[in-house]
Image (cartoon, rainbow, N blue to C red):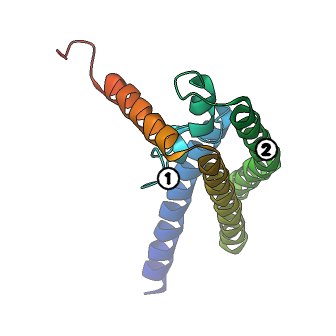
Amino acid sequence: MTKFRKLVLGSAALALAAVVAVNVSAATAQEGQGKMPFTRGDRMVGGFGGGAPLISIALKHKAELNLTNDQVANLEKIRTHHQSQVTPIQQQLTANEKEISSLMQQTPANLIQIKAKIQEAEKFRSELRYLRIEALENGRTVLSAQQQDQLKSLIRTTHDRFRKSPGQPS
């Protein structure tokens, strides 16, 4: 029975390590792509615009949205402030994911340390999510209700255009 237990525990540990390795690889690959906050990968379900880089899109289409100089300045300030807050946290998260990967390379893997690092990584992700929501809310307060509606419409139109494959009729 002890050999059977060892086999089951070893298999479970190996399966867990494989799952974590895949997740770490995916997270590291995303980080390595220079992923910026406000991108589709950080989608906020049910949010204003569904996770697109709203502040950047609003600034890109400032003429269409009839943004005032004050609105442009405020949106740029929000974007810059957000970036300055997010960058160090993203760096910490990347370093944390590398530590997890390194811990998993050890034989046997120290599951207690790995679990602690995973929990630490989730705190970083939670903080990044909050900062993103905070920036979106701050950006929303800068725009009038009409401008918010125009931005939603603009995003919807752009999104629909990208969803259609090139061979599909309009």
Name the residue carrying label 1.
Answer: 44
Image position of 76 with respect to 165: above or below: below
Give the label, 1 or 2, closer to the camera: 1
The amino acid on which the numbered mark 1 sits, given as a three-letter code, is Met
Q: Residue at x 44, y 54 (%)?
A: 45
Position of residue 97 measured from the top left corner of the image (x, y, whole percent): 70, 52
Contact, CB < 8 Å: mark 1 with mark 2? no
Neighbourhood count class around disc 2 (C-alpha, 10 Å): few under 14, some 14–19, many 20 upward: some
Name the residue carrying label 2.
Answer: 87
Q: Residue at x 61, y 56 (%)?
A: 133
What quarter of the picture does the N terminus occupy? Answer: bottom left
In the image, 116 versus 110, the foreground residue is 116
Neighbourhood count class around disc 1 (C-alpha, 10 Å): few under 14, some 14–19, many 20 upward: some
Q: Residue at x 60, y 24 (%)?
A: 60
Question: Which corner quadrant of the image does residue 165 belong to?
Answer: top left
What quarter of the picture does the C terminus occupy? Answer: top left
Position of residue 83 measured from the top left corner of the image (x, y, whole percent): 77, 42
Question: Which corner quadrant of the image does residue 121 belong to?
Answer: bottom right
Image position of 77 with respect to 98: above or below: above
Question: Which corner quadrant of the image does residue 150 belong to?
Answer: top left
The amino acid on which the numbered mark 2 sits, given as a three-letter code, is Thr
The mark that comes first in sequence, 1 or 2, is 1
